[in-house]
Amino acid sequence: MTSVEEHYCKEPNKFPLNKFHQLGSGKGKHILIVGESPAENGWRKSGKAFYNTNGKILASGKRLNLLLSDFGLSVDTCGFTELVKCFVGKNRKILFNCSEGCWSIFLKQLGSEDYKLLILLGMQTLKIFNKLSNLTLEIGGLSKAVLDSKEYSFLPIYHPSPINPYSLKRNQLIFEKIEMKQLLYKG
């Protein structure tokens, strides 16, 4: 049975900043991983990013951990949020409209912590992010830009889902080019 859509884009000022906003710790407290929107059976049900209700890490989380482990990071130590807070289910046509309503929530979450690096997950997330931010970030490119009056580093990568058999290999090539000091610059 498919879940009913959940919309937060209509009243963004009522959205609690800690909902769908996992804080990082240690080296990961300055890194925010940004997903597209809550999935059917992810943390909107479990309360923890990349985990199911049984406390088991999801395949996307495992793949992301493979990329982060060389830097001493994991999905548990990095911050995480969704760009779009609404659960749209299979109604993907409304995703961009929801993102416009959720953008202010995202910016408040971003400004609530001392993030230095945003890792954007997937082409759709990047497309929405670029449109809302007026930036022109590209998959695999580590760049700096100002967003909401603060400078951040951005690293858009392919979504780590195993649905795309090439994403892990492509992301590994992206991460091989990055040195630790680039990923975790001192701020």
Image (spheres, grey):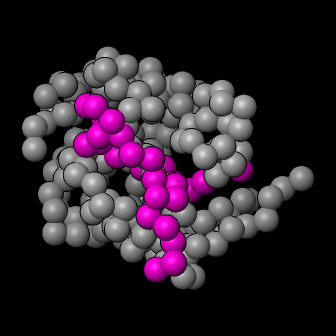
* Residue 101 vertical position relative to residue 158 in the rendered view, above or below: below
- Where in the figure is residue 130, as x and y percent of width and height? 34, 63
**Residue that sits furthest to the top in the current view:** 70
Query: Could you tell whether 135 is left or right of 87 in the image?
Result: left
How many labels were placed on the picture? 0
Front position in the image: 66 or 168: 66
Report the residue at 10% width, 44% height from top.
187
Quadrant of the image occupied by residue 117: top left
Asked whether 79 falls inside the magenta stretch, the response is no
Query: Could you tell whether 136 is left or right of 80 in the image?
Result: left
Query: Could you tell whether 179 is left or right of 18 in the image?
Result: left
Looking at the rendering, the stretch of residues picked out in magenta corresponds to 13-40
Asked whether 24 falls inside the magenta stretch, the response is yes
Report the residue at 21% width, 47% height from top.
116
* Residue 95 vertical position relative to residue 74 in the rendered view, above or below: below
Report the residue at 46% width, 80% height from top.
13
Regarding residue 124, the answer to whether it shows in the image is no
- Where in the figure is residue 113, as x and y percent of width and height? 28, 55
- Where in the figure is residue 139, as x and y percent of width and height? 35, 44
Query: Could you tell whether 175 is left or right of 152 in the image?
Result: right
Report the residue at 18% width, 24% height from top.
179
